[in-house]
Image: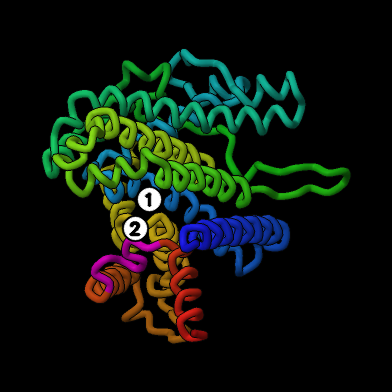
Amino acid sequence: MKQVNASQSSKKSSWISFLITLAFLALVFCLDQIIKPTNKMYMLLTVLQKGSVYALAAVSMNLLNGYTGLFSLGHAGFMLIGAYTYAIFTIPSSARDTVYQYFDAAIRVSFPEVLSNMMGPAGTALGVLAAVILAGLMAAFFAYLIGLPVLRLKSDYLAIATLGFAEIIRAMFQWQKLGPITNGSNLLKSFARTSKFKLEVGDTKLVLSTFVPVLIATASIFIIVKLVNSTYGRAFKAIRDDEVAAEAMGINLAKHKMISFTVSSFFAGVSGAMMAMVLSIAQASNFKSAMTYEILLMVVLGGIGSISGSVIGSLLFVAASEWWLRGLDSGTFLGINAPGVFRNGFRLVVFSIIIMIVVLFFRKGIMGEKEISDLFRARKKKARGAAQ
């Protein structure tokens, strides 16, 4: 009887989570139409766009570090691969010679352009989606090759090895001999960006610049949640807790570590593609190791082993650093005008202090290893206990 009640409550909480997600997506869609670039609240859309990118990156890192116990620092490298793959395959043919002005472009295929010629406006959307998926697949392919030798290492040695590979990837993409593909050390531009994402319905133009990245991030995180709750997810947690015991239970360590590593890298590549389309960044010099450390910080703030925590930590990190504390660099903050105190760079000082306070008082992060659905269940149990 208890098992039946538990399964029913689990299904109910899943439906509640699903409805909340749909309501959130509907809200984002409405905000996209209401808030204009001249509006003071436009920074909210910027936070949602950038937050969705980092939320997916943090969740994908948490899958590897938090759920499987593999300490990897190569995330920026896989995001770089995703960003370049997306940019290369969405540059229109008319602009390719201008972008590759110092090289003869080796790849001249634009997915949105090809599919739009075949299917019309719907083909453009499918072309963008195909480029995003290909970005993830390319990142996963490189992760598989890197994982063959690297996943035999443990702990700090794995972190150092993956960090080294990320730096090698960044150097390779800036190599002039690969210029016909990567454009060398020059940036890629003119590719499909969210600022151009619009849908025409009759005489009405619907803006999708925030809705599209949030939708991609939501769908990707949903897939990761399903993976974590599957038998593979339970195997990942067993490996994290005790590798010897997991192997004794019949879990193939090499296989499951490789699955976790490639899946994490796939979604890192997708987040890299999102970063390219949202921030118009497709240059190897921007994907430094500091980016990996930022994502790791978001994971730690939210809670290692909590997907909800990674999302919350990412949104809070982006909102605080990009919006709430902006006035500390401009001389005015919360209505206080103090140019001598609030000056350029002071925002980072205050932000660092806030992070230290959060880490001191929340040792396991904001959510620990709990999810938002767990909080709902805990409240229901308390309510039932009080009623009895």
Quarter of the image where one finds residue 127? top right
The residue furthest right is 202
**Image-based side of 385 in relation to 62, left or right:** right
Say which of 58 and 226 sits in front: 226
Expressed as whole percent of the image width and height from the top left, the position of residue 173 reads: 33, 26
Q: Amino acid at mark 1?
A: Ala
Expressed as whole percent of the image width and height from the top left, the position of residue 191 reads: 56, 32
The residue furthest left is 157
Check disc 2 and report its element: helix, strand or loop: helix
Check disc 1 and report its element: helix, strand or loop: helix
Q: Are marks 1 and 2 in contact (CB under 8 Å)?
A: yes
Q: Is residue 93 magenta?
A: no
Q: Amino acid at mark 2?
A: Met
In this view of the protein, can residue 225 be seen by the observer? yes
Expressed as whole percent of the image width and height from the top left, the position of residue 14 reads: 55, 56
Which secondary structure type mostly characterizes the magenta part of the structure? loop
**Image-based side of 369 in relation to 46, left or right:** left
Label disc, if present, on residue 58 of the rendered structure? 1
Quarter of the image where one finds residue 23? bottom right
Label disc, if present, on residue 298 of the rendered structure? 2
Q: CA distance from mark 1 to mark 2?
A: 6 Å
Q: Residue at x 44, y 72 (%)?
A: 378
Say which of 236 and 180 sits in front: 236
Q: Residue at x 41, y 58 (%)?
A: 314
In this view of the protein, can residue 318 be seen by the observer? no
Expressed as whole percent of the image width and height from the top left, the position of residue 129 reads: 59, 32
Q: Is residue 367 magenta?
A: yes
Mark 1 or mark 2: name the one nearer the start of the chain: 1
Q: Residue at x 47, y 63 (%)?
A: 2
Magenta region: which residues? 362-370
